[in-house]
Image (cartoon, rainbow, N blue to C red):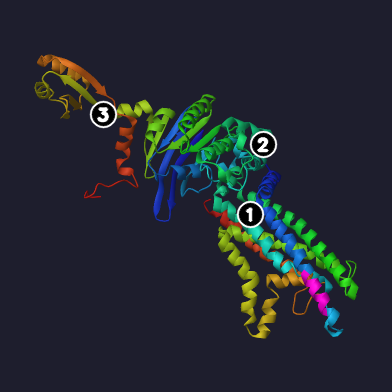
């Protein structure tokens, strides 16, 4: 289990992390979602004991990373796939890691095989594609067969086949009872690969929950088609907003489909379609982090 | 079994021997120490064949055969520097510290690997350079042997000098974190500072010069310590203090800084 206990991180004049406080539980894939620059990588580095928090602490199974007896056997992390000396071969890189934590060398060959880069194990890492480097990073994370796994933007650089492989892989790790914490700035990726999601923006906690919970709380719209949209519009007095779409259908906000159906029945209007439009996680995310995008696009002319 | 300092040493040893720059550095160290030593010895031999007795007074066959050390000190220093600075240049320091979060343990392991391996290579280099040098001097009757007073110590300490400079490089690499900056500081200490001191009034020079790393090295390797130098023992201790000082500062920064 991973616990972030009121962690803040100040870099000179920027507050990268502002009082983050959450737990990551075993057995599920937990997504860590936020726009670029929102503090995800900083949080990961603080968990790994690489950066020192200004306030608070991060613990793994109750201990700070620095105090772990055999860190690679408890935590595996892929923070930056390029954090490797490019002049060293993949196998030697992993052997050096294995030796530092008394992990037998035969485990090196196992993980190389598992992530599918055994054939290039003796090649220098500098010649690896980003996807191959990611796989090497994953191999390094698995080396000590740890119960807690951290992955910072793992799908970057992977091809579609690799992305699918890694999603299934995360699920299987979680199913084995491990704690799996995966960051991404892509909500579409999190929607399919994570069970639980923690959303941050500008270093602040925004919300957390399952994908279903996050989308359910968002107010969706209802798509309505009927023979006389004008009459229905008049009948829907409790709706907060009604938008008339190009094909004459109505997009109704602030009222449930049940209430729309009953209002239509009372007014004697036959409905041809009544479809609740569930907000996608993407919309929810955009909504939640709209104020928290550090490097956003600004509409020309708009005040910013 | 929980990891120990020994695990960290094994890890650092694998890292040290699996990059080509180490091989190149070791070859450079051998070539410079032996090659330059041989060239100097040959030059001296040819000079003395034409020149009579007077120039031979005070001639030191040990120190001259070890003249290559003056160049080899840049090879060992660079090896020490890049062992540390490439960790920062490539970002692999984060992987390293994830595996060994006890940072001083990591630094100790790196230092032990660097010092031990450089000591072995340097000792081979200086003893080979010494023996070839003596073989060159022998026909003109200027050679000495390891059993002559102070000679064995002088040759052995030349290797220790080089190994300590490798450690100095590790410390500088840790403080500066970039290869270029570290090499500039290192070269300034060994080359530029002596030149600047040369411009000072001569009675100051005598007081300051003997503290310079390169002069400490000369005192360590000469069988008869030259004038205006500390004894070889004191010189060794002063150099050790420099190395320790740089490593302590580097270690404190390593503990404090974000990786």
Give the number of the disc on residue A219: 3
Question: As displayed, is residue B112 above or below residue B100?
Answer: below
The span picked out in magenta is B39-47
Picture coordinates of residue A146, whole percent (x, y):
58, 33
Q: Residues within 10 Å of mark 1 (few under 14, many from 20)?
A: many
Q: Does label 2 lie on the same chain as label 3? A: yes
Q: Measure how far apart labels 2 and 1 are at the Cα level.
A: 23 Å
Question: As displayed, is residue B64 above or below residue A201?
Answer: below
Picture coordinates of residue A203, whole percent (x, y):
39, 44
Disc 2 is attached to a residue of which chain? Answer: A
Picture coordinates of residue B179, whole percent (x, y):
58, 59
The residue carrying mark 1 is B83
In terms of sequence position, does the residue under pointer 3 or pointer 2 come before the other? 2
Question: As displayed, is residue A127 above or below residue B44?
Answer: above
Can see residue B163?
A: no
Q: Residues within 10 Å of mark 2 (few under 14, many from 20)?
A: many
Q: Measure how far apart labels 3 and 2 are at the Cα level.
A: 51 Å
Can see residue A243?
A: yes
Disc 3 is attached to a residue of which chain? Answer: A
* Left or right placement of residue A262 versus residue A284 in this view: left
Q: Give SS at disc 3.
A: loop
């Amino acid at each position: 289990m991973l616990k972030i206990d009121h962690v803040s991180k100040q870099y000179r004049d920027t507050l990268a992390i502002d009082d983050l406080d959450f737990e990551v539980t075993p057995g599920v894939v937990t997504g860590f979602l936020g726009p670029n620059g929102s503090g995800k990588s900083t949080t990961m580095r603080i968990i790994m004991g690489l950066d020192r928090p200004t306030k608070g602490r991060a613990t793994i199974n109750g201990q700070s990373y620095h105090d772990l007896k055999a860190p690679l056997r408890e935590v595996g992390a892929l923070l930056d796939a390029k954090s490797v000396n490019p002049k060293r071969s993949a196998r030697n890189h992993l052997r050096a890691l294995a030796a530092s934590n008394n992990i037998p060398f035969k485990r090196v060959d196992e993980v190389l095989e598992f992530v599918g880069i055994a054939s290039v194990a003796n090649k220098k890492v500098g010649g690896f594609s980003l996807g191959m480097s990611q796989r090497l990073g994953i191999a390094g994370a698995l080396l000590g067969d740890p119960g807690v796994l951290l992955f910072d933007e793992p799908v970057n650089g992977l091809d579609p086949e690799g992305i699918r492989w890694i999603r299934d892989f995360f699920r299987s790790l979680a199913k084995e009872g491990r704690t799996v914490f995966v960051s991404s700035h892509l909500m579409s990726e999190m929607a399919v690969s994570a069970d639980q999601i923690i959303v941050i923006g500008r270093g602040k906690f925004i919300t957390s929950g399952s994908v279903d919970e996050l989308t359910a709380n968002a107010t969706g719209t209802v798509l309505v088609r009927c023979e006389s949209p004008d009459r229905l519009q008049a009948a829907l007095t409790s709706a907060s907003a009604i938008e008339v779409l190009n094909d004459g259908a109505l997009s109704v906000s602030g009222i449930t489909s049940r209430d729309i159906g009953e209002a239509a029945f009372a007014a004697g209007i036959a409905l041809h379609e009544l479809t609740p439009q569930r907000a996608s996680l993407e919309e929810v995310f955009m909504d939640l982090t709209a104020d928290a995008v550090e490097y956003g696009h600004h509409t020309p002319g708009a005040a910013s | 079994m929980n990891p120990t300092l020994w695990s960290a040493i094994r890890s650092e040893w694998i890292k040290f021997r699996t990059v080509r720059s180490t091989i190149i550095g070791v070859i450079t160290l051998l070539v410079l120490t032996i090659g330059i030593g041989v060239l100097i010895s040959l030059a001296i031999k040819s000079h003395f064949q034409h020149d009579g007795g007077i120039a031979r007074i005070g001639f030191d066959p040990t120190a001259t055969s070890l003249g290559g050390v003056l160049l080899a000190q840049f090879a060992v220093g660079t090896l020490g520097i890049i062992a540390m600075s490439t960790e920062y240049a490539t970002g692999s320091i984060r992987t390293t510290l994830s595996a060994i979060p006890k940072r001083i343990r990591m630094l100790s392991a790196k230092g032990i690997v660097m010092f031990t391996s450089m000591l072995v290579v340097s000792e081979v280099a200086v003893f080979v350079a010494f023996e070839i040098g003596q073989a060159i001097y022998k026909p003109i009757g200027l050679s000495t042997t390891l059993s002559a007073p102070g000679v064995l110590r002088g040759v052995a300490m030349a290797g220790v000098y080089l190994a300590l400079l490798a450690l100095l490089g590790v410390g500088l690499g840790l403080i500066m974190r970039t290869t270029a900056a570290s090499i500039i500081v290192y070269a300034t200490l060994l080359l530029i500072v002596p030149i600047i001191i040369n411009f000072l009034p001569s009675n100051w020079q005598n007081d300051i010069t003997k503290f310079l790393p390169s002069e400490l090295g000369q005192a360590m390797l000469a069988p008869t310590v030259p004038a205006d130098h500390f004894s070889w023992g004191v010189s060794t201790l002063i150099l050790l203090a420099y190395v320790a000082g740089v490593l302590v500062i580097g270690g404190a920064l390593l503990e404090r800084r974000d990786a």
